[in-house]
Amino acid sequence: MSASNNVLNVTDADFDQTVLQSEQPVLVDLWAPWCGPCRMIGPVVEELADAYAGKVKVTKVNVDENQQVSMRYHVRSIPTVLMFKNGQVVDTLIGAPGNARQVLAQMIDKTL
């Protein structure tokens, strides 16, 4: 699933503990294997996970396998990237912009 050791694959079962109870800000990439735009931003998410290791937790949630998280956050389109701080969503990106690395890095930087 992920080429980076700094990306955590999160499920409905461990979402609250891994994301909502995290001391660090958490970037959550909601994706599916069949989604082309998800595959486009996937490597960017992994690159940022490595770049921000120790500062931000980076997670991926497969929406096909973990529908509770998608329903809880009203995910209607993927990819959706949610930025959490202190258990609350503080920023959202829907879709895969051409400048994904810059947009996602700004999301993270704003949260730190």
Image (spheres, grey):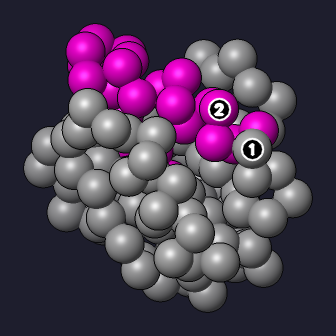
Q: Foreground residue, 31 or 54?
A: 54
Q: Which residue is mark 2?
A: 47
Q: Which mark is residue 17?
A: none
- The magenta stretch spans residue 31: yes
Q: Residue at x 19, y 63 (%)?
A: 74
Main SS, magenta region, reads helix
The reply, left or right, for residue 108 in relation to residue 54 is left
Q: Residue at x 46, y 40 (%)?
A: 101
Tag 2: residue type? Answer: Glu
Asked whether residue 44 appears in the rendered view, the answer is yes
Tag 1: residue type? Answer: Ala
Q: Residue at x 70, y 17 (%)?
A: 3
Label 1–label 2 contact, CB within 8 A: yes
Alpha carbon separation for disc pair 1 and 2: 6 Å
Q: Is residue 69 above or below residue 24?
A: above
Q: Foreground residue, 92 or 22?
A: 92
Question: In the rendered image, which quarter is residue 24 located in?
Answer: bottom right
Q: Is residue 50 above or below residue 32?
A: below
Quick one: label 1, few (<14), some, or many (20+) residues within 10 Å? few
Q: Foreground residue, 20 or 102?
A: 102
- Residue sitting at the far right: 54
Quick one: label 2, few (<14), some, or many (20+) residues within 10 Å? some
Q: Which quarter of the image is occupied by the C terminus?
A: bottom right
Count of numbered labels shown in the rendering: 2
**Where residue 36 appears, x then y in whole percent?**
25, 15
Magenta stretch bounds = 28-50
Q: Is residue 111 above or below residue 105?
A: below
Q: Which mark is residue 51?
A: 1
**Helix, strand or loop under label 2:** helix
Asked whether residue 16 appears in the rendered view, the answer is no
